Image (cartoon, grey):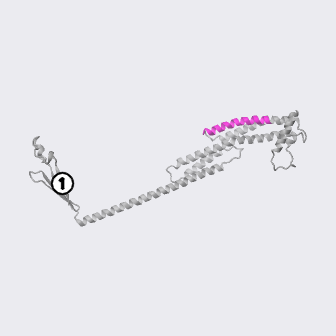
């Protein structure tokens, strides 16, 4: 009993030492501490037993809650559906509080206050354990929304609709992830998502402007080349019209009993004279021994063109 009293005094002294420094010495001590001290003197036996029982119940409820929180963390890490994250977190917190309330004994006001304070501490501890998983869930929702925006932005010049849809999807998912009793928010993550989307939109606008400018320059160059081509054709037509008529003439002559074929033509102010030496077309009709007089070595033909 003496050792338990000494331990209780040590606990009370540690609690007083860890209290905020802003608290003055003249401020009254909590009722649970006064009761633990036996009303200003030695701690009462009843309060010692209540303190140890309360701490044991707190540790048991917190351990079970942490096991359930570990399952929430696995769900987020595995990339599973996060639509039920907030409800599951609320269920973990409510289950821990219910178990603690069920283990709270009926007693006087000091014992009731002791358990009430410990229950609030339990709720804060459970929420502190859930918070890292909540942060990771928001990060996963942000990444999903960003990937959706990128997919919708492919081939689009106006990205306003895609940006609005991505932000709306993130807000919808984040709302159901917030535990009801936590009071947490997602303004920072939302602002970060909007900033990234705006940066992508800015780069896309710049790329579109450069692409449009290049297309305009290419179109201008093509129009210039077409204009130059038309002007060249007009100049050629004027030059051809001044040098000769628009009529054309062609003729061919083959002297009898010769292999000489002479042909000439006149078109667009230019004259073309062609002289060729080919065998007689009717040589094949004379039989295998009919073609005896070839032109040139190995019966090769000869032609010559003269442009005037």
Residue shown at 48% from the left, 57% from the top: 210
Is 181 placed left or right of 247 in the picture?
right
Is 162 placed left or right of 226 in the picture?
right
Q: Position of residue 30 (x, y in %)?
A: 85, 44
Is 298 placed left or right of 131 in the picture?
left
Residue nearest the viewer, comparing 36 with 308: 308
Is 274 rendered above or below residue 38? below
Is 158 placed left or right of 31 in the picture?
left
Is 29 rendered above or below residue 105? below
Q: Position of residue 120 (x, y in %)?
A: 77, 42
* Magenta stretch: includes residue 56: yes
Write down the region rendered in magenta. Answer: 55-79
- Tell me the quarter of the picture where residue 223 sits: bottom left
**Dot 1: element:** strand
* Magenta stretch: includes residue 226: no
Q: Position of residue 100 (x, y in %)?
A: 77, 36
Q: Position of residue 186 (x, y in %)?
A: 66, 48
Is 247 rendered above or below residue 155? below
Residue shown at 57% from the left, 51% from the top: 163
* Magenta region, main secondary structure: helix
Q: Is residue 102 visible?
A: no
Structural crowding at the residue carrying mark 1, measured as other residues with C-alpha within 10 Å and reported as few (<14), some (14–19) or many (≥20): few
Q: Residue furthest front?
A: 297
Is 225 rendered above or below residue 120? below
- Tell me the quarter of the picture where residue 305 sits: bottom left
Residue shown at 75% from the left, 37% from the top: 98
Residue nearest the viewer, comparing 190 with 27: 27
Q: Residue furthest left?
A: 257
Q: Which residue is under mark 1?
A: 304
Residue shown at 62% from the left, 45% from the top: 139
């Amino acid at each position: 009993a003496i050792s338990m009293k000494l331990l209780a005094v040590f606990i009370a002294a540690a609690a007083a030492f860890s209290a905020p420094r802003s608290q003055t010495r003249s401020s009254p001590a909590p009722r649970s501490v006064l009761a633990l001290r036996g009303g200003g003197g030695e701690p009462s036996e009843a309060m010692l037993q209540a303190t140890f029982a309360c701490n044991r119940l707190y540790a048991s409820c917190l351990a079970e809650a942490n096991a359930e929180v570990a399952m929430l963390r696995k769900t987020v890490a595995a990339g599973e559906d996060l639509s039920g994250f907030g409800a599951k977190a609320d269920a973990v917190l409510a289950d821990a509080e219910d178990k603690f309330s069920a283990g709270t004994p009926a007693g006087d006001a000091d014992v009731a206050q002791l358990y009430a304070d410990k229950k609030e501490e339990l709720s804060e501890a459970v929420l502190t354990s859930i918070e890292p998983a909540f942060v990771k869930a928001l990060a996963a929702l942000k990444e999903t929304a960003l990937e959706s925006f990128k997919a919708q932005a492919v081939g689009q010049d106006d990205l306003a609709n895609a940006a609005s849809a991505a932000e709306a999807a993130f807000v919808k998912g984040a709302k159901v992830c917030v535990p009801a009793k936590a009071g947490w928010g997602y303004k920072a993550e939302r602002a970060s998502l909007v900033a990234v989307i705006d940066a992508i939109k800015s780069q896309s606008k710049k790329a579109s402007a450069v692409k449009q400018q290049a297309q305009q320059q290419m179109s201008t160059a093509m129009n210039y080349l077409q204009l130059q081509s038309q002007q060249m054709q007009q100049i050629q037509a004027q030059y051809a019209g001044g040098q000769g008529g628009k009529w054309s003439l062609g003729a061919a002559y083959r002297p009898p009993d010769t292999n000489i074929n002479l042909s000439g033509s006149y078109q667009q102010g230019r004259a073309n004279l062609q002289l060729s030496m080919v065998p007689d077309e009717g040589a094949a009709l004379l039989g295998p021994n009919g073609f005896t007089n070839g032109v040139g070595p190995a019966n090769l033909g000869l032609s010559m063109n003269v442009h005037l």
